[in-house]
Amino acid sequence: MSRCNAQSIAFKSWANWGRTLLAFLVLSCRPVAQAQEAVLKERFESGRVIYANQCADCHGFGGQGGTDAYQDPLVGDRSLESLVRRIVRTMPEEDPDLCVGQEASDVAYYVYHAFYSSEARAAMGRAPRMTPARLTAEQFQNAVADLVSYFTPHQKQPAGHDHLLMASAQTDTGLRATYFQSKGMNKANEQKLERVDQVIEFDFGEEGPTPEIDGEQFAIIWEGGFFAQTSGDYTFRVTSENGARLYVNHDPGAQRGKLRDDSSVAGQAALIDGWVSSGAMRSMEAKVQLIGGRSYPLRMEFFKYKEKSGSIRLEWKAPRGVWKTVHEEVLRTHRPPRTFVLQTPFPADDRSLGYERGSDLSYDWYEAVIQASAEVAQEVVDRLPLLVGFKAGDEQRQKPIQDFLPRLAEHAFGRPLDAEEQMLYEHRLFETSDRPESAVRRGVMLMVTSPSFLYAPWGVTSDKPASYLMAARLARLLWDSLPDAALLQAASEQELSSTDKLQEQIARMVDHPLTRFKMRSFFEHWLELEERDLSKDAALFPGFTPSLMWALRQSLDLFIDRVVWSDTSDYRDLLLADYLLFSPEMVEFYLMQSEEGFMVESVTEEPTLKDWVRVQIKDRRRAGVLTHPYLLSAFAYPNSTSPIHRGVFMTRQVVGREMKPPPVAVAFNEDDFEAHVTMREKVTQLTQDAACMACHGVINALGFPLEHYDAVGKWRTHEKDTPIDARSIYETDEGVTFSFSSAWDVAQHAIGEEQAHNAFVASLFHQFVKWDPAAFDAKGLQQLRLHFQKNQFNVKELLQEIAHLVVP
């Protein structure tokens, strides 16, 4: 069959579909005048013919794409009016003047109703389909951690309080410290003092910690929680000439109360054990893997026994961080229970759509699940006495263990067991095992590899009752984990079917540390911060040290937290705020000899921001996250700015415009330009070709307004003795032009742009739900955007509205 005949047949097929769709549109409308029906029909038919003649060769007869000119399908979230303006300006690409006026209006009408809009795609069966998806690696790690933690005894606390909330609260910072006067081999002979220490960094010299404690021999125990702000390997370092021992993420127990001369408590070896000392100063390091957004038990034991002097310092280094003294920023007086941290490596999850999905079922993933199930089983078996509540070696332990295993399965599955499952986990496994521990091992491996545990609670035929399914969806959405006790109780009492009760649970869970951690992960994605290298030329930027880079990242995270978790939680403040939070190191680097006008205010009311200041910048020279020094440094070269990198970020993430791959990849080479040429001039020369300007007309227009900030984010007025020119003319998709001369101008434009709002809402949805909004509702994105706009761009309320959309 010739290509022409094939296209003719394909077109006739689409023509028939178009007529069918037109009939559907007309019949589904309210009765209208005969004349109006004729106009609609004529407009649709006219548009269909124009599309076939001018558009189908590139976009496909059904807008499906897949051609050399356009690979992507012709779909989107523009309004019909916006689509008309887009076509007038840009289509057909080789001669936009061919389709203007009524023709552009007609073809837009056809495209919109035939296949472009979410409603048209749903009618055609082209809406994103919800297919079964397994847990991502991060979700699996969270789920098994909370499965074990659910049964781990917690330190006594007020009724109704969540130990994670208490452990991560900004109050009660520091560690509880108990000071002892030692006597001979009895290190804890007499308790002399109990207080809260905000840092473990003491040089006692030859004296005691207090006048009441003799300096010859004494001991100290520090105990509390360590809050991990991100996931990964944490390194701890203890420096002392005396005896010292550090426990991190251990099971706190009474056996250690008397400062034993060994760390022989079963299964609880110290992370760093320097209990035996020669009196010489030494530093000892060790790593431990932690999951972000959680607090872990920390215990530090120290004793001095007739050495000449006494001192102790505890330091830590976060993933991709720098060495810092452990202080109140991460220390909590509340001692949390141990958290199980899975060590089994998983293959990388699919990120082809811009967010992690559990879409592939590879052999490597299956092998990882089997290995992980064995690791989880070993953890449960090793800690059975603690989890179940019996003494090791108890001959009467089988009955409590038999009662425990089905309860563990219920929590793993997030629902009550059916009769067959109850029989399996309470009886059958024990009847076919020689020891109760063997039954537990088999049972845990069964439940962790079960589809009821492994698959996300969307896109599958669920075995959960409706209320438990809602609970599972809430926990997965907000925590990437399992429901907690309060949520399971609400499910068991059918409370989630009540809109008010459901909202109570959503509000409670949104304010949870695990949700805050997930929100921080979202911003890391939205701001494209993953694995960014901020290193700069030391000769050009002396003082831009790893320590300063770490402070910059802290500053950015603190700023985002302040905005998002405030009462207003206003997205606009993220882009327009005129202040920054500065550490002492940042003050010295950025404000000394600064050309910016600024005002410094204290922020000492927050314990974790001790010595930090709030710096308000005058004359609209800063615009929220867009001009934060960390972000500006990340989107820059080691020795110069990069309007292209900054412009691409602004185009995709802030303004929300799609970008095609460049037709020709042109490398930037500094040696191609004379020494006096400014970066703006270099970029202009490099991208002046018409093929480049199709994208760089937007990229440059959004990147040049940031040229007042150098490669480390400092304000400047000149580059190479040439005054900075930050002006640009920006043209929207709809052909409206704006004049920009600063980052504040760009931010002000973005907060009023529907396209920017759509991009932010979609990104938040993707990162939290890991699906497309259209999979839940053809108008889901539009509904969420309208809610966002109506509610003063409140990010927390947007997240709650997402929950209401996807949970029922």
Image (cartoon, rainbow, N blue to C red):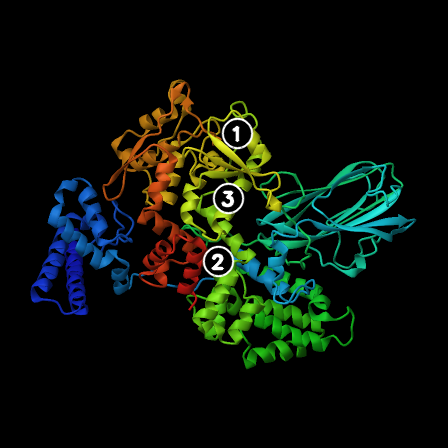
* Label at residue 559: 3
> Which part of the image, by quadrant, shows the C terminus?
bottom left
Q: Amino acid at mark 1?
A: Leu
* Label at residue 591: 1
- Which image quadrant is residue 214 in? top right
* Label at residue 199: none
Label 2 element class: loop
Q: Nearer the viewer, residue 602 or 671?
A: 602
Mark 1 surroundings: few (<14), some (14-19) or many (≥20) residues within 10 A: some
Residue 412 position (above or below residue 76): below
Mark 3 surroundings: few (<14), some (14-19) or many (≥20) residues within 10 A: many
**Could you tell me which residue is drawn at 11 percent across and 58 percent down?**
45
Residue 63 position (above or below residue 468): above
What is the spatial separation of the Cα atoms under label 1 and label 2, in whole angstroms?
53 Å
Residue 1 seen from this side = no
Mark 2 surroundings: few (<14), some (14-19) or many (≥20) residues within 10 A: few
Q: Amino acid at mark 3?
A: Phe
Residue 390 position (above or below residue 179): below
Front label number (2 vs 3): 3
Q: Amino acid at mark 2?
A: Ser
Label located before the other in sequence (1 or 3): 3
Q: Is residue 640 left or right of residue 789?
A: right
The residue that mark 2 highlights is 362
